Amino acid sequence: MTDSSLGATAPTSLIPASRGRVGDHPIFVLHAEATRRAAAGESIVNATLGALTTDEGTLAVLPSVLEAFADAQARGAAGYAPISGRPEFRRAVIDSLFAETPLADRAVAVATPGGTGAIYQAMVNFLEPGQRLLTTQYFWGPYRDISMHSGRGIDTFALFSADGGFDTAALAEGMERHAAEQGRVFLVMNFPCHNPTGYSLSPEEWDEVATVVRRVGARVPVTVLIDAAYLHYAGDGRDAWVPAAEAMLEAATVLVAWTASKAFTQYGSRTGALVALHRDDAERTQIANALGYTSRATWSNCSHVGQIAVTRLLTDPDLATRCDTERQALTDTLQQRIDVFKREATAAGLDFPRYDAGFFVAVFTPDAATTARVMREAGVYTVPIDGAVRVGLCCTPAADVPRLVEALVEGVAAVPAA
Ligand SMILES: Cc1ncc(COP(=O)(O)O)c(C=O)c1O
């Protein structure tokens, strides 16, 4: 209720830049609608969310992880964690990525609230206000929000070349342009298991990326952020980027956004880290201090319980083995869904990128809004993005995949010819 004695228009002290913003993520809005319809008794396939569910539709969790979190709480996680994170947590994350490679000794890390916090940390410390990050044409939407919110911006290069592989020429053109225009390049690479397309770079493609990065990095400061949110679901391709990261270090800073959200199915624990690799000792100290400062100036410190639990999950041999086995069972379930999808979608003539692993795949369509709308009318929910719809196999039981593919075919066919 407004007080009429105070005037006709409601006073506001919200600054202009913050007015008219969308407070919720569009994906959660679609998810809420799908959930409402299902609760009202309709048969719904909800392939919107980025969380792994069981075939019965419940959030998939790992018993070893639940045990580690309960135990961590009992071990005294009530106090503040150090601002940059517990040293043993930071070491455990670095070792989990780089043990037995020379990179383990060239890394520093800071704890963050999930991968999102790691991306924020990277953006505000390696890109000047007013400058733009460079990423693939299809990208995780919050990159844009984080960049805009922090006074930066976003620019893209074509992800796929005509033969369906990674478009190294487009990457090179984008990096050269940023080098010329802003004297600095901040490249975000969300591989393996790219969200939203499902694409993973081959070792040869990573080699080509490293060559471009070294060439541009010889002239201007270059930072490569590898958003490794889906790393643990990449199967054999999990470490395909590591030799390239080593090669890039000759001329660039390499950052890794690490998160427990998907790796340990602990989306709500907000446990993550930004790992920074640099060849120079003094520069690593500078970076570690800058990251600690940003933590202090934003969220102060991060989930203590998450850091204690994840440290144990990474370093206690019995717990780590149990956790890996449990995660493998989830990966197998996901792989069954992927296999059914690839078989059915290929037979139906749908257009989608190489997809071997990961939570999502994109199906190309000239009009994503129409395709997604027609699918919703048939009770099937996907996420429309520019040029494609994102399909979450992470939350679609294998038995529902044929219906999903059928709806995709109808949704793509509903787009009028140009
Ligand atoms: C590509 C990508 N990066 C980063 C994240 C960050 O996730 P979180 O902040 O939960 O760790 C997500 C989560 O959906 C993602 O899809």
Image (cartoon, helix red, strand yellow):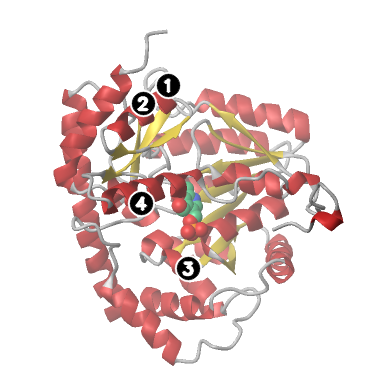
What residue sits 36% from the left and 55% below the top?
51
**Which badge, 3 or 1, comes first in the chain's sequence?**
3
Q: CA distance from mark 4 to mark 2?
A: 33 Å
**Which badge, 3 or 2, comes first in the chain's sequence?**
3
User: 110 or 61, which is in the foreground?
Assistant: 61
Q: CA distance from mark 4 to mark 3?
A: 15 Å
Q: Is residue 100 visible?
A: no
**Which badge, 4 or 1, comes first in the chain's sequence?**
4
Q: Residue 140, labelled with which disc?
A: none
Above or below, 118 relative to 223 = below
- Going by the numbered disc 1, the residue's amino acid type is Asp
Q: Nearer the viewer, mark 3 or mark 2?
A: 2
- Going by the numbered disc 2, the residue's amino acid type is Thr
Q: Nearer the viewer, mark 4 or mark 2?
A: 2
Q: Nearer the viewer, mark 4 or mark 1?
A: 1
Q: CA distance from mark 4 to mark 1?
A: 33 Å
Which residue extends farthest left? 399
Mark 3, residue position = 93
Few, some or many residues within 10 Å of mark 3 (<14, 14–19, 20+) = many
Label 1 residue SS: loop
Cβ of disc 3 within 8 Å of ligand 1?
no
Cβ of disc 2 within 8 Å of ligand 1?
no
Q: Residue 371, labelled with which disc?
A: 2
**Which badge, 4 or 2, comes first in the chain's sequence?**
4
